[in-house]
Amino acid sequence: MLRTEINELLTQTGPGTPMGDLFRRYWQPVLLAEELSANDCPPVRVKVLSERLIAFRDSEGRYGLMDEFCAHRGVSLWFGRNEEGGLRCPYHGWKYDYTGQAIEVPSEPETSNFCANVKLKSYPMIKRGDVLWAYLGDPDKRPPLPEWEFITVPEGQAYTSKRLQECNWLQALEGGIDSSHVTFLHSGSLDSDPLFKGSRGNAYNKGDLKPFFEVVDYEGGLLIGARRNAEEGHYYWRVTPWVLPNFTMVPPRGDHPMHGHFWVPIDDENCWAWSFDYHPTRPLTEAEAAAMRAGMGVHSANDENYRPLANKDNDYLMDREAQRRGETYSGIKGIALQDASLQESMGPIVDRTKERLVATDAGIIKARQKLRKAALALAQEGAEPVGNRTQDQKVRSVAIVLPADQSFVEGIGEAMVAKPGVPQTTV
Amino acid sequence: MLRTEINELLTQTGPGTPMGDLFRRYWQPVLLAEELSANDCPPVRVKVLSERLIAFRDSEGRYGLMDEFCAHRGVSLWFGRNEEGGLRCPYHGWKYDYTGQAIEVPSEPETSNFCANVKLKSYPMIKRGDVLWAYLGDPDKRPPLPEWEFITVPEGQAYTSKRLQECNWLQALEGGIDSSHVTFLHSGSLDSDPLFKGSRGNAYNKGDLKPFFEVVDYEGGLLIGARRNAEEGHYYWRVTPWVLPNFTMVPPRGDHPMHGHFWVPIDDENCWAWSFDYHPTRPLTEAEAAAMRAGMGVHSANDENYRPLANKDNDYLMDREAQRRGETYSGIKGIALQDASLQESMGPIVDRTKERLVATDAGIIKARQKLRKAALALAQEGAEPVGNRTQDQKVRSVAIVLPADQSFVEGIGEAMVAKPGVPQTTV
Amino acid sequence: MLRTEINELLTQTGPGTPMGDLFRRYWQPVLLAEELSANDCPPVRVKVLSERLIAFRDSEGRYGLMDEFCAHRGVSLWFGRNEEGGLRCPYHGWKYDYTGQAIEVPSEPETSNFCANVKLKSYPMIKRGDVLWAYLGDPDKRPPLPEWEFITVPEGQAYTSKRLQECNWLQALEGGIDSSHVTFLHSGSLDSDPLFKGSRGNAYNKGDLKPFFEVVDYEGGLLIGARRNAEEGHYYWRVTPWVLPNFTMVPPRGDHPMHGHFWVPIDDENCWAWSFDYHPTRPLTEAEAAAMRAGMGVHSANDENYRPLANKDNDYLMDREAQRRGETYSGIKGIALQDASLQESMGPIVDRTKERLVATDAGIIKARQKLRKAALALAQEGAEPVGNRTQDQKVRSVAIVLPADQSFVEGIGEAMVAKPGVPQTTV
């Protein structure tokens, strides 16, 4: 249970809010690279952390991310012409380069200094992996470029998608941290989804409905261990990192690619669920890639605006017969939408004064505490947020069987460190 | 004309409001029995008196009506699995019985007392006739079960439907009380609707466009008499009861089944119009039942969510030619939608500071006064509301020709008392 | 840049606002005559200056414009029966004449004086040209009937349309005043639109991307001159009047019909863009009329509610390839929607505290100043607004080539005065 003011602190990420300021200290995924697929291609509207921006790729391939609206009269630059090194407003021809700097105002004499004083708010945006990342904070505090393993593996080894989720980012993040629901909500999918099925771990998963959770601090955030019974004298541990503020992973299953998420606030009532899959040591197979593109695993089948085809307007295509037969536990098809449907059903911003947490929510509780502390420490003392160093980001989740008397932290050792060419630790 | 504060008092029925507290002292229809048609069938969302609830029917046929949202993290139990004696949240498997009591929380040790302390807000819901009735008030004040004649006649003698009406409940109720509009709005339907046409009373109805209204107190509410000229020295009286807070009837026509309504607040801007038909002494004919199912009489043709197919989004399928020819007086087809269209056109909550009432509105004026007094008496003195006794509910409406010098109260005598096996008094 | 309070002053036109009071001193177009095409035809809802009204045409052809809602219980008179000299509410038969006066209340004795005291708020509405004009202000201050040339030319010489624009009226007006955007936004259409192409002026237009603007006061509002280079020693002047509060014209091109607009507030976030075309001395050709009906020139292709088929819900059918090829500068087809799309993209009411105006915005700046002064002078001193005299309205826009040393005011002489039978001055 949270007090109202803490719930507001954690869920509000617009400009000037403590959580908003914290988010503005991290590179965040804002577009799939495919959305700006060529030089001079059409610009794309971006709403992130409650700011309305326009993204474009100029004639030389540089990415621009700036105020959506022309400095002159406020027209949306989405209607703009992306040409010859800049984005031109179609109303009176004002033109901006990728930094937001006005470079041509046709009505003004060329000899005037007018352009020099016109600059749109803009943010750096760079491509890493299949993702365009933006940094919306103070330029002097800009962290190193993102180093997550899924964006640094060789080409062909990763796949990334995004989908709209119509609720506050924290509801979505908490689903990513909380692996206790897998036993219930996703139980039907463990055996059927081509990107999940067939691992020995699934049997442990289904064999023990009362996992024990152990959550330990780690420099970038938390390590969340879920312990289930394995063979006599052994435990099956699923261990996953949460890195501040909004990176989570799912522990691996056999040789399947590993997967994880970013949960990026659009505004306070919507977020992007970013979902990635990658294998550290081999290319994705054609079958795997096809399943991902089809919306299986952690991905989803979406419309052209990346909104899931199964959504709240059609009750997520609820299938009561599939629910009754246990094909799907909730009647909703697909792991991603199983999560999204329930998280959205809580309302745009769930009232956490009414919740009733239990031991298996330990990860959620600790993550909220860390987020709150980090936001307040930044606001009050300017404390540097954690999670931006390369070593914070070079993490993996791990699935492992350990002797009953061994702590999981000791047991996984360096298995959670992402090392090029080294396979994941998985059961 | 009402003062703003009285309009608010009468129209607001959420938790903690005076009218809301009054409504919470009565059994109210909340679902058609067909909506929970079998044990372990899918749960159904219910919004009533501004509360969001979930209704279900358990493995033993018991009805549950409780908070829509899981006590754990706030997921909607609409996604729940209705199985083995309870409704189970699909997120982490928390399970509730039909009283809202948690009966299983899988993550907790079976030996713990955890469940005992988790109980959702819940209300009794019972089946009477084709209707599921709920009581949302103080358990100690729970009135006897509903005894309306339409739910106690033998099977086959009644038909009940509901439709969404997109305005405040009081606008809808006032339409039910006000029989003066029949002469105008419904004039086209008296001759054509198979459930209305062919009675001698219709001729009186059309022959006197200036009915005189007499409204008298009666223990459960009001008796509203509309007097029109009949043969020399006689009056045609249409007399109908209003029982607090929201039960109205329509006086009978010949041997047609009698009909009436409940107007149940969903929230302050929407209500359910419940419509019933029944004959006290014989089964409905196949033709009558078919006409009712087809949306004739007081019923309507609806979509799968009980929203009329003719609604404000399509201007109620207004047919100006039918209006011009007088087939329908307003151009809208069907008695139910003729009422709904006009009541919705007043806006979600009509501003009664601007109205201009006349003598024929006497029933409306007195009903408002009684509602206001009952709500204030309950709030200030805890006064027991009227309308809950069996004798209050065993009422009928009456259509009768009386000598000009006889008062209608004297003239109808016991005709308004519902007695099993006794036919209605009708012309 | 405007201060917030000035932006609010200029954009709010509801009852009791300074700009609303100013608008209420002018005849305004409210319906196309075709919308009330016959005596006793269906009534039409009108929302103007944030007032909800009903318009009808009675059995004798008189136009009524009055409160949409019945004085009795607030039912929308859109459902009314328009018959025998009045509009009758279908609920209880109350009937109103074209002045809003109740003329029949069936429930009341005919001998009573009841009707005499029931009168709906109503406004005079008259037909001039193809337009129904209404005056919503103080009857004692009613100005002479509108005398714009497009409504006084002989039949067959004019065409008028209207379209919904989903933003504040001032954004739309400012587009009409600002001719500097033509060079950019509409550049693709000058050569292709059958109602624009083929004039010598278009070559001047395209040959000089840095027009110089000169804005001079004139009794009814402003004269806005745009000067571009023509042949050696000459300038091409496009001169257009703005008449308070919301009349603008477009300078002519060759022998094409002239065109102009009214921008009429519906409420503060929507307006009607009225668009007219007329030729002072000859009938429109069949080809011209067909092009106008098809939505070319300043018109648009609309649905049955006069909302453009290309609208914000479908991104105005943006065609990026047409944008890239330069067929259309912004990718949106048609001059009207090119304007509307950008003006709507600014938001329902653009925040003018953020704009950055330049020399070519001189017309906009002066028009705002005049509007503000007129509204304040009316509010504070009751000063009579300008623009209502016949000579204020008998104006034309002009396109002319003048020697470089001649002022445009001197050069156009009487060319901007509309005189029956005299051709426009055009290049």
Image (spheres, coloured by chain):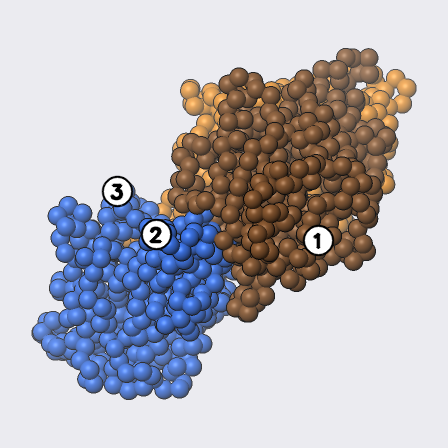
Chain colours: A orange, B brown, C blue
Location of residue C347 in the rendering, given as x and y in whole percent from the top left corner:
40, 51
Which residue does the image show at 12% across and 77% down from the upper left?
C414
- Are discs 3 and 1 both within one chain? no
Disc 3/disc 1 C-alpha distance (Å): 67 Å
Which one is earlier in the sequence, the residue at label 3 or at label 2? 3
Which residue does the image show at 81% across and 40% down from the upper left?
B421
Residue type, mark 2 in image: Asn
Q: Secondary structure at mark 3?
A: helix
Q: Which of the 4 image quarters holds residue B189? A: bottom right
Q: Nearer the viewer, mark 3 or mark 1?
A: 1
Q: Secondary structure at mark 2?
A: loop
Q: Is residue A193 above or below residue C203?
A: above
Which residue does the image show at 77% across and 27% down from the upper left?
B98
Q: Which of the 4 image quarters holds residue B414? A: top right
The circle drawn on residue C5 is 3
Q: Is residue A205 left or right of residue B205?
A: right
Q: Is residue A216 visible?
A: yes
- Chain letter of the residue beneath label 2 in the structure image: C
Q: Which of the 4 image quarters holds residue B99? A: top right
The circle drawn on residue B254 is 1
Q: How many marks?
A: 3
